[in-house]
Image (cartoon, helix red, strand yellow):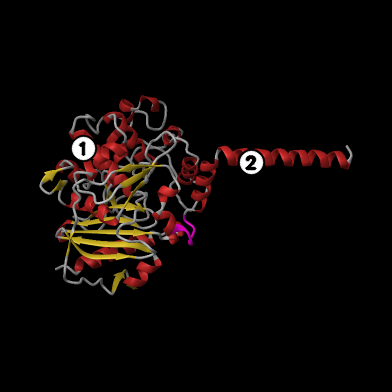
Amino acid sequence: MTMKIIRKILFGLASLLGFIVLVVVIFFRQEAYQLYKVLTFFDKDAISSNFKNVKDIFHTSIVSGSSNPYHFAKRDKVFALPISFQFNDSTVNTQAYLDYTLTDALLIIRHDSIYYEYYANQFTENDHHISWSMSKSVISALLGIAIHEGKIKSIEETVTDYLPEFAGTGYDHVRIKDVLQMSSGVGFNEDYGDFNSDINVMGRYFALGMPMADFAKRLKRARQPGTYNLYVSIDTQVLGMILTKATGQSITDYMNEKLWSPIGAESDAYWIVDNSGMEFAIGGLNATARDYAKIGQLFLDSGRWLGKQVVPEAWVRASVTPDAPHVMPGKRSTALRKDGYGFQWWIPYGREDEFNAQGIYGQFIYIDPDKDMVIVKLSSNYHFKNDQTGYFHDHEIALYRKIAEQFN
């Protein structure tokens, strides 16, 4: 074969490849854009903007704000954050820590009033912020409502009672309770620093618009369900699928009717959805800091809002009460930290009454019933991805407890 012929072949292959790329760009432009955004979503210079403008990147569905919005009262007296807080043997400057973790919003609610409100990185009280895994706690609340309404009979029922298409997968005959407690037994690698981990592959899968149900069906059982606590984000997607199947409504519509409107949400919220229209239950909820605070206030008040029971009190109590050795604070064998786990809520180690919703990159709804206090912290902490020690989580908890000490 002459060099001239080889050049013609190579030129033809290059032209064909260029044509294929052009076709992909034309017909899958949105998917290609979303994939690019996922791959660069947490870049230092773009992360805050991305966390604020999710609806400009992904398909979303809107949870309408309440027609009768509730506004927290603002306390006249100025509340000052502690100048510093202690963690182990080190003293940490509070403002320096807020800056280092790219804190976009910090809101302190006590006695149903705003004691402190702080925004940075071009965020305001009207801006939405992605919740990431704080969404999981909202899905749990909606499940509690559905069980109270009889839409779901019991958490002792199994995934395949509602989703028979999961027969033969890692979720086959797994109790709903075990999925709620991140004890499904499904094998899953949640390492955000590993490009090829399950969580990162799932992110790219979602970016292309593929249904999350298809991804969940690929997962296999690794352990006996109900015996081992392993954080598996896709568990919550399965819970979301059970919710939609049992209620006959989308998560968006059910949340609007049963939660968002009853608590007087000031602003619309929105969920990221895949190409099938299914909400990204794992972490796709976007809302304002003040409306996230309402979720915290609702759980602080045992599921009641202005005297009306929105989430069943027994469900709230069960959600924040670990009830087996593998989910107890201080006894979990799988985590860098010692926090316990309830029904998609975290129970910090070292205190008896605190609990919180958490999301990656520094999202928190922190509730301290003893102090009648809710703290919301929304962040774009790009350092998180390389944290293999639990550094940020431990410092966040230390900061919140220091704030609580201000109220004696």
Asked whether residue 60 is in view, the answer is yes
Dot 1 surroundings within 10 Å: few (below 14), some, or many (20 or more)? many
Left-right relation of 227 to 148? right
Reading the image, the residue beneath label 2 is 22
Magenta region, residue range:
42-47
How far across and how far down the image is residue 215, in percent? 45, 35
Left-right relation of 282 to 115? right
Mark 1 and mark 2 in contact? Answer it, CB < 8 Å: no
Single out the residue that lies furthest toward the front. Answer: 67
On screen, 163 above or below 43? above
Left-right relation of 174 to 206? left
Examine the residues drawn in magenta and state their main secondary structure. loop
On screen, 18 above or below 120? above
Image label count: 2
Q: Secondary structure at mark 2?
A: helix
Reading the image, the residue beneath label 1 is 145
Asked whether residue 388 is in view, the answer is no
How far across and how far down the image is residue 132, in percent? 37, 50
Q: Residue at x 47, y 43 (%)?
A: 198
- Check disc 2 and give the amino acid type: Leu
Q: Residue at x 36, y 24 (%)?
A: 164
User: Of 300 and 393, which appears nearest the observer?
Assistant: 300
Q: Residue at x 25, y 31 (%)?
A: 156
